[in-house]
Amino acid sequence: MAKHEREFTGKHALMLFCGAFAVIIGANLALAVNAVKTFPGLEVKNSYVASQEFDVRRTAQEALGWSVYASWQGQQVKLEITDAEGAPVEVAKLSATLGRATHVQDDQQPTFIFDGKAYVAPADLGPGNWNIRMVARAKDGTEFTQRVILHVKG
C-alpha cells in the first residue's frame, strides 16, 4: 500500500493565516480589557485648567518650606512633616490615601493623629512599595500636596 502525502493547499494556508491572526487579536483584546479594568482614573478633570494654576500652587507650597518623610513600623504609618528649621509642623487639616502605585484595590484612607512630633495612623501593609498621596492645609490656608513613597520591608 502506497502512502499518500497530503498536499498543502490554499485552504490550509488560509486556516493557518486566520489562526495566527486570531491568536494575536485575542492576546491584544485580553491585554486591552485588563488595562482598562485596572486603570485607576484621571488625576484632574481638566488638565489645561490645572496647568494654569500649577506654578501659583507650587510657589505657595515651596514658600512653606515643608519636608515630608514616611515610615512604617509596628503596624503604624508615621508621617513626619517638618518646617525649614526641622521642627514638626501641625497642620490645620490632613487627608491622605495610602495605596499601591499600580492599582487601587489596596487603597486605604488612614486617620492620622498628631502626636506632637508626627502624624501616626494604624495600617495593615504588606511588603513592597506604597504611596501616600497626602493633602495638608497650613494654618494660613495654603494647600500642600505631595506623593510620599513608603517602603515596607517583608
Image (cartoon, grey):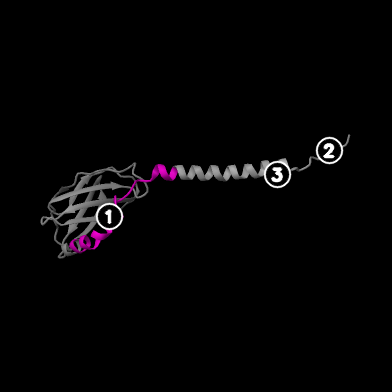
In the rendered image of this protein, does residue 124 appear above or below residue 83? Answer: above
Name the side, left or right, on which 14 lies relative to 100.
right
Q: CA distance from mark 1 to mark 3?
A: 55 Å
The structure residue drawn at horizontal position 20% and vertical position 48%, both measured from the top left corner, is 95
Q: CA distance from mark 2 to mark 1?
A: 71 Å
The structure residue drawn at horizontal position 35% and vertical position 50%, both measured from the top left corner, is 101
- Crowd band around label 1 with a 10 angstrom C-alpha radius: few (<14), some (14–19), many (20+): some
Q: Which residue is mark 3?
A: 13
What's drawn in magenta, residue-wise? 34-60
Q: Which residue is mark 2?
A: 4
Residue 5 at what x, y percent from top left?
Answer: 81, 40
The circle drawn on residue 49 is none
Residue 145 at what x, y percent from top left?
Answer: 23, 55
The circle drawn on residue 147 is 1
The structure residue drawn at horizontal position 11% and vertical position 55%, both measured from the top left corner, is 139
Nearest to viewer (mark 2 / mark 3) = 3
Q: Secondary structure at mark 1?
A: strand
Residue 83 at what x, y percent from top left?
Answer: 16, 62
Mark 1 or mark 2, which is nearer the start of the sequence?
2
Residue 52 colored magenta? yes
Name the side, left or right, on which 90 lies relative to 108.
left
